[in-house]
Amino acid sequence: MQTTERKVEIKPINCSHYIGGKYVESKSGKTFKNINPATEEVLGVVAEGGREDVNEAVEVARTALKGEWGNMPVRKRSAIIRKIGDLILERKQELATLETLDTGKPIWLSNSVDIERAAYNFHFFADYMTTVGNESYQQDDIAIHYSVRRPVGVVGLINPWNLPLLLMTWKLAPALAAGNTVVMKPSEVTPMTATVLAQICTDAGVPEGVVNMVHGFGNTGAALTSHDDVDAIAFTGETVTGSAIMKSAAPTLKKLSFELGGKNPNVIFADANLDDVIETTLKSSFINQGEVCLCGSRIYVERAIYDEFLERFVAKTKELKVGDPFAEDTKVGALVSEEHYNKVLSYLAIAKEEGGTFLTGGKKADMEKGFYVEPTIITGLGRDSRCVREEIFGPVVTVLPFDTEEEVMEQVNDTHYGLSASLWTGDVKRAARLSAQIEAGMVWVNTWFLRDLRTPFGGAKRSGIGREGGAHSFDFYSEITNVTLKL
Ligand code: NDP
């Protein structure tokens, strides 16, 4: 049994709402506890927002829309947005520590991915916004048609717990770049970095009332999605929550952007470079404890290399150290909460009932405290198994052999999800042919999670609505008016 001996110099914070450029408590005075998933200790308390707090935040955001933010010269707004990215980097150690305390993810990951990328989201959109153009068409000598943009208005940003700062900034940066005002609702289990981010925005020069935040549970989010005076909702989270939000936003016909769940296939052909496959598949299976929407949790391997793949993949997985997120050599930290841990363990029980074989893991890790699950590779499950079909969102993958392209493609698309897929093959024609057939928003060929922020990001089928990234984000956060000028 391992214990966790930690040297953490940065202290956790209590989390208040942020409204009108100030931290404020809930009108009801209610709070809830924030738990460290790696130790089960209480990190602090979080203000529990109700409808009245959401109402105030929306009213403040609506008033701020009339201020200078949306009408500011682009270069000035861009400089402020760039500064937010700079300040995130200046406070990187603090933010990375808070993210690891909240999520249980390894500190090296918070440092190298979450916080770096959060800063880059602002740097990217600060540059991008200065290049945005509009459409224009000359209709013979009759008219010129051109479009103009304005902010959509007050936008609600609702986010999950797996990449808290990265995902919040992925929405906040373009929303601000396009001149909107916002109300953020972070996940109840990971409130700390968003709390710091709100202050960073003010420190960077964002006018008061432009960035607001209300903490709380699902009902706090629902108060935002049903609010009369909110114009758009950008949501990342589970597919079922997306469906509930769609219903609650329907009466006021809000503009919606949804990035939802996935059950992504990772298809490996015998002509792929197996060294690359193993190295990347370890990441696409277990990085961030498998709590990444893009993780390739359904692995399909061509039968000719099935045994070799498994032997090497199992050996490498056994080397992954599970444990204290603040230890440098930890590769897999704690799952984010007790509730989620129990959900992942329940799928391991289902796999057992369904007759699966655990080649690694299959159980909680040997830690004194905290919500740790061993990286788990399961074989022997049929395509109808719940573990093959449902999103587990933990360090759990299933591996199935296949014989033909047709057979594997049929299984790849046999799902309601359609977020992403990985294809491994040395045959470029096959890669192009199959990529076009995969019903997913993103296909990676011989790689995984390689991102360029200009590209469309989002899911097909029940994995999302709309795309974000570059022009796609900018279009979502802008209202476009066409002007026809008769000549
Ligand atoms: P949830 O859908 O449970 O929660 C997401 C956010 O929505 C939280 O802030 C949550 O509040 C809030 N919420 C819950 N119910 C409602 C409601 N009725 N109305 C408005 N807001 C609500 O997702 P998880 O936090 O469990 O995150 C994991 C999921 O996110 C996985 O399915 C994963 O695939 C998906 N995801 C998708 C990504 C993508 O890009 N496609 C990226 C990352 C994750 P509360 O804190 O109380 O739960």
Image (cartoon, grey):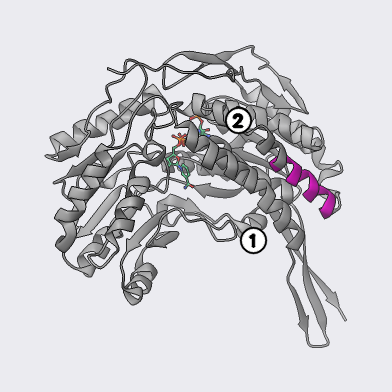
The answer to whether residue 76 of the structure is visible from this angle is: yes
Q: CA distance from mark 1 to mark 2?
A: 32 Å
Q: Residue at x 33, y 32 (%)?
A: 321
The stretch of residues the image draws in magenta is: 74-85
Q: Is residue 227 left or right of residue 204?
A: left
10 Å neighbourhood of mark 1: few (<14), some, or many (≥20)? some
**Callout 2 amino acid:** Gln
Write down the quadrant of residue 331 in the picture: top left
Residue 87 vs residue 387, the one in the foreground: 87
Q: Is residue 472 left or right of residue 41?
A: right
Write down the quadrant of residue 135 in the picture: bottom right
CB at mark 1 closer than 8 A to ligand 1?
Answer: no
Magenta stretch holds residue 79: yes
Q: Is residue 352 left or right of residue 484?
A: left
- Residue 296 at x, y percent in the picture: 34, 50
Decide which of tag 1 and tag 2 comes sooner along the chain.
2
Q: Which residue is mark 1?
A: 471
- Residue 373 at x, y percent in the picture: 30, 29
Name the main secondary structure of what is drawn in magenta: helix
The answer to whether residue 160 of the structure is visible from this angle is: no
Please tell me whether residue 140 is drawn above or below residue 182 in the rendered image: below
Where's the C terminus, which quadrant? bottom right
**Callout 1 amino acid:** Ala
Where's the N terminus, which quadrant? top left
Residue 169 vs residue 375, the one in the foreground: 375
- Residue 273 at x, y percent in the picture: 30, 63
10 Å neighbourhood of mark 2: few (<14), some, or many (≥20)? some
Query: Which label was assigned to residue 93?
Result: 2
Query: Which label was assigned to residue 358?
Result: none
Q: For the residue labelled by badge 1, is the local secondary structure a helix, a strand or a loop?
A: helix
